Image (cartoon, helix red, strand yellow):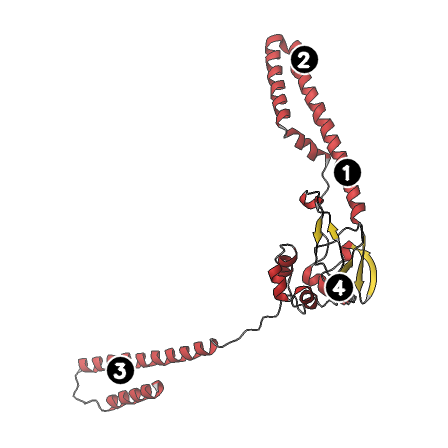
Amino acid sequence: MTAILNKAHIISTDHLLDARPASLNKYSKKWHLAFVTIYCSRTLFSLVRNHDSKVSLILDHVILTVPPENGCFKINETTLTDIVKEKRLEKLQIIGGVNGVASSLQTSLNSGINGGAEDIARRREAFGSNIYKRPPSKSFFHFVVEAFKDLIILILLGCAALSLGFGIKEHGLKDGWYDGGSIFVAVFLVISVSAISNYRQNRQFDKLSKVSNNIQIDVIRGGRRQNISIFEIVVGDIVCLKIGDQVPADGLFLDGHSLQIDESSMTGESDHVECD
């Protein structure tokens, strides 16, 4: 309707231009031309606004399809973290319990995951690997610097410096350095012994950590029980635990009885935690 009216107005202005009297003076012609120019400009602006409104209405109905983060998996890493690590059981119930989580991860409670190379690669790409970056080994110089940060050591060094200064001033350099120098020697001996002891303990701990972390665990893949390293476990694996086994990762308890876990290494509490 707007376009029809605008067209009629344009035709009427053409009629005005054709029917203008020849007796109009110079000023009347200028005013008439200005009026026609303004009127045509308003008509063009009206057409542009109508076109923009139609385009905006079309864009308001555009629907974007966003693919899921994990491809074929129906659950993401954030949801799993909330359920297992943060222990938000209400989210577990919304998904459908343990069966719902297993279905979302494409895991069979009887035969486990597929276990093929492609399946393992997809799971590692979607959820990551069961490994962590080890911090670099600390050098001997690091423990020497740590020993100097001790408040008692700093106080002894200050006392040694004062004793050395007053001794030299009072008895001269030849005889005045004994007391202050002796304190300095004693302090540096303490620092050296402490740094060497801590450095050796750290080296032994690194060796034990490398040996103890190379743990084998039983999982079910493709309907068969397999023995793999804890670093090869992926999200969705069904792990079979025995008495004395180390739990390789956070997870959900599927089946069993009288399962108790020692969490003293993480929480400091000696009491075992019972899982149900």
- From mark 4 to mark 3, how far is it between C-alphas? 75 Å
- From mark 2 to mark 3, how far is it between C-alphas? 109 Å
Amino acid type, residue under disc 1 in the picture: Arg
Pointer 4 with pointer 3, Cβ within 8 A:
no
Between 239 and 141, the residue placed more toward the observer is: 239
Which image quarter: residue 150? top right
- Tell me if residue 43 can be seen: yes
Which image quarter: residue 6? bottom left
Name the secondary structure under disc 4. Answer: helix
Name the secondary structure under disc 2. Answer: helix
Which image quarter: residue 258? bottom right
Q: Which mark is residue 178?
A: 2
Give the residue drawn at x 77%, y 34%: 200
Pointer 4 or 3: first along the chain: 3
Amino acid type, residue under disc 4 in the picture: Ile
**Mark 1 highlights which residue?**
203
Between 91 and 57, the residue placed more toward the observer is: 91
In this image, 216 relative to 83: left or right? right
Amino acid type, residue under disc 2 in the picture: Tyr
**Mark 3 highlights which residue?**
36
Q: Position of residue 35 (x, y in %)?
A: 24, 80
Between 103 and 168, the residue placed more toward the observer is: 103
Pointer 4 with pointer 1, Cβ within 8 A:
no
Pointer 3 or 1: first along the chain: 3
**Mark 4 highlights which residue?**
120
Amino acid type, residue under disc 3 in the picture: Val
Pointer 2 or 3: first along the chain: 3
